Image (spheres, coloured by chain):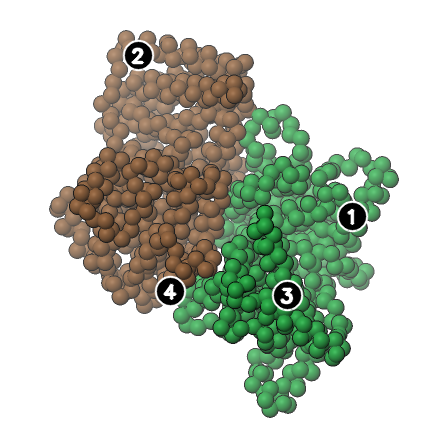
Chain colours: A brown, B green
Amino acid sequence: MFQSANIPQTVSKELLQKRLPELREELLEVQHKLRENKAFATIILLAGVDGSGKGAAISRLYEWMDTRYLFCNAYHEERSESESARPNYWRYWRDLPARGETSIVFGSWYQEPLRDAVMGKIDDAELERQLSAINRFEKMLAYENILLLKFWFTLPKAEQQERLHDIEAKGKKGRNFIEEWSGAEHYRAAQTAGEKASLQTSTGYAPWFVIPSQDPDVRDLALAETIAQSMKKKLESGNGKPVSAPAVVTTLSQANAVDAIDLSATISKEEYKEELEELQDKMAYLTDRKRFKKFGFISVFQGNDAAGKGGSIRRLTRSMDPRNYKVHPIAAPSVEEKLHPYLWRFWRRLPKKGHSAIFDRSWYERVLVERVEGFCSEADWMRAYNEINAFEKELTDSGFILCKFWLAISEEEQLRRFKAREETAYKNYKITEEDWRNRLKWNEYAIAAGDMVDRTSTRYAPWTLISSEDKRYARIQVLRTTVNALEKAMKKKDKDKEI
Amino acid sequence: MFQSANIPQTVSKELLQKRLPELREELLEVQHKLRENKAFATIILLAGVDGSGKGAAISRLYEWMDTRYLFCNAYHEERSESESARPNYWRYWRDLPARGETSIVFGSWYQEPLRDAVMGKIDDAELERQLSAINRFEKMLAYENILLLKFWFTLPKAEQQERLHDIEAKGKKGRNFIEEWSGAEHYRAAQTAGEKASLQTSTGYAPWFVIPSQDPDVRDLALAETIAQSMKKKLESGNGKPVSAPAVVTTLSQANAVDAIDLSATISKEEYKEELEELQDKMAYLTDRKRFKKFGFISVFQGNDAAGKGGSIRRLTRSMDPRNYKVHPIAAPSVEEKLHPYLWRFWRRLPKKGHSAIFDRSWYERVLVERVEGFCSEADWMRAYNEINAFEKELTDSGFILCKFWLAISEEEQLRRFKAREETAYKNYKITEEDWRNRLKWNEYAIAAGDMVDRTSTRYAPWTLISSEDKRYARIQVLRTTVNALEKAMKKKDKDKEI
């Protein structure tokens, strides 16, 4: 979820100076339109690590927006007498904005479940139960004409510590919203709980938007852009129910986890040969029938066209027993498949325990090609992130080891490979009109891939992003990641047995 | 949930003979239309107590429908080798019908959670977690063009025992679908778990339909009518997403819990006086400030117009301290209230602990007047049942005692009271044009009230249905129910303290 969050993002002075006046105008305009037609209410919900500048961002918003239709509700951990004499959610209900209004929420309904999880007061099952209740509540809000925009402010750990240190040194104890449990000493626990919460509650009707908060300009611009665009889109889409937050493409530079892959990595021919042999031996050993029968291995390959998925897959499977694995090349769905839910064709291809399935393209096409080419609606691919996370959770919960690879190449390298394919007779089948067409949408695919990695990289099924500019380097990385994942899972199992 | 289920229902030979040929034609017609336009797939899911005749009902359906587009999937508790080598939901995914097809599901994804709950293998929290997963799955189905019709077959306990005894006597061990844990010895546990499951999973997109199964004709007709009407409605509504099961009004006699209230109950004047005094004393004692400060009392009054809600409320509150309670008469929402979610105005009126609130009409107007008069869409009031259950769960979880009363009178008695009101000067304000208009929709209101009681009578907040044909009788019942509920809750608290 937070993969892109720690990548340093900047915005140029020029862009800021050009964009800011427009943006402020847009914000005022949507506010006034909404005030007139009263189509929905807006809630801007802020969460994230302590010290990330949520308060400062809101001060900025107050400067930019019409404060007559904007109000702020901060909820404290310690409840007032009148709050604690009533049910848990009473204070949030009390303060719901009317249609036409916008409210900003600090210390929302996420505060207590997160704090209790971080402090070890509730276990995983109870956290999950409370998050389900949140989902029910937020779904109701969507159906009842409330546009809920949820923002998660992130900061790398070192940066956070520095800031909190500064704050302490300056004696700013008067900060009016300190969540101690989200401070530096709980950084890791807070991140784990936060990730769990944000994944489970990033729904089609109320997705989380991650706000990288190292640079205040980036932070405030990302926040304001998302608000302006979401409200505008919602106003344009009319009164259809439920009101859900739309996908947003900001004018920011869109530095994301996929863009940030270092493409300079290489490996020498000698090293390659040596490592390849060693790793393939390990693969044969690890997926040996007898050892492997309690497991199952599922691998997903996505990446830029011509990044070398096929070659990597061949090296991965080289030493595996062909009776025990299958490679599934995924193209457009068949007529029969189109008559079923989009995940159906992947459920059908799931291997049995003891077996492996390698997917050359996968269910992620839903949020890549189907999103970019408009083969499904925005609402459809927005809800897909959550559905995919649930699907992969079920896979890993039932004993499957899941490795997801994104193979990346540069635009220039792709051009070289496309041309080489056209010129080489036996590679000719590999290049089509469609490949050239997709290439024209390079940026859109890059944004979709970045969103995908951010929204579907989970503890139980993380993405591995690999430079394939040097194909040999990529093949080794794929093999090494897989071997490590298998070894780790099997070691864990052995350990569990011992106990 | 099952309040109406045990009321004996019958269908006349004449109606059956007249309706059946039409219904069969309708079923074939929707099947063929669906086959042509492939707008959605249909899943008919069967659950309920053992011995209720699910199998027999399906045989009937097979007679009536075109079996070329109909197939049946029965899932057994013991999984096959290929099923157990894959994730839990794999077998359900494998068998999903394609758009244009209809599948019947026996022993669905509800089977294992229910069995484990009944057998005490999982606790409440784990059951709730699994039901949440079911909700996610079913929501996905709705979004993915699958119309899911869920039927819960019910039978009174005595009837079930008799049937199972018969089956045993006849040596019909070969029945191909025996769920032992839903048998007679687990009747109560199965009912508790079933109620919990059906309440939590009766969502706007996939509500449960209760099928009273004592009379096979009623059972099969109710099933077939619901299927035909749901599919027809869905076909007519076009391709809008998500595909959700619509509300259904069958041609059956609609005997429901509200219709079945015995209106002949009376009480003598002497008894009335005596009991009234005693109960009011108890009310004063129970809601005394000091004793009551850990509690809170919320009461809901609904019923036919002129059933005597006001009079009952006055007797209930007579001996209570006016500083500690408030009566809220609920009329049409104000302009401000209309700009908020429909539950907002009730959240605002929630009392503090130590206090009481009596609602003369309530949030139930959503599924009564708003449904009947079309003030909200079908989708809106369908999801309201679940939202209201969640709301009341939160109230009771946080220490409030909740009593819900439905006061019933006959159509004739209402007419007498209306006329009396018109003739008596000081009662004149009590009768309006609107009352006469509502009276014309007596049947529609009766159906809505029956559905309401069925779908919102929970363990933690049951409905009490009271005949108010004799007003004094109703007043005593209201008081007695309230006194009992308060005493029980306070005794429980004292006990908890002792431990």
Q: Is residue B241 visible?
A: yes
Q: Quadrant of residue A433?
A: top left
Q: Nearer the viewer, residue A23 or A431?
A: A23
Q: Nearer the viewer, mark 4 or mark 2?
A: 4
Give the SS element for disc 4.
Answer: loop
Q: Is residue B55 visible?
A: no
Q: Nearer the viewer, mark 3 or mark 1?
A: 3
Residue found at x 46% / y 59%: A86
Please give the chain letter of the residue carrying mark 2: A
Q: Nearer the viewer, mark 2 or mark 3?
A: 3
Q: Residues within 10 Å of mark 2 (few under 14, many from 20)?
A: some
> At which x and y percent is residue B122?
60, 38
Discs 4 and 3 share one subunit: no
For residue A141, side relative to residue A428 (left or right): right
The type of residue carrying mark 1 is Gln
> At which x and y percent is residue B477?
68, 69
Residue found at x 37% / y 27%: A405
Mark 4 and mark 2: Cα distance apart in space: 64 Å
Q: Residues within 10 Å of mark 4 (few under 14, many from 20)?
A: many
Mark 2 and mark 1: Cα distance apart in space: 71 Å
Please give the chain letter of the residue carrying mark 3: B
Residue carrying label 2 = A272
Residue carrying label 4 = A98
The type of residue carrying mark 3 is Val
Q: Quadrant of residue A180?
A: top left
Q: Nearer the viewer, mark 2 or mark 1?
A: 1
Residue found at x 47% / y 64%: B352
Vertically, is B104 above or below B350?
A: above
* Circles 3, 1 touching at the beta carbon (< 8 Å): no
Please give the chain letter of the residue carrying mark 1: B
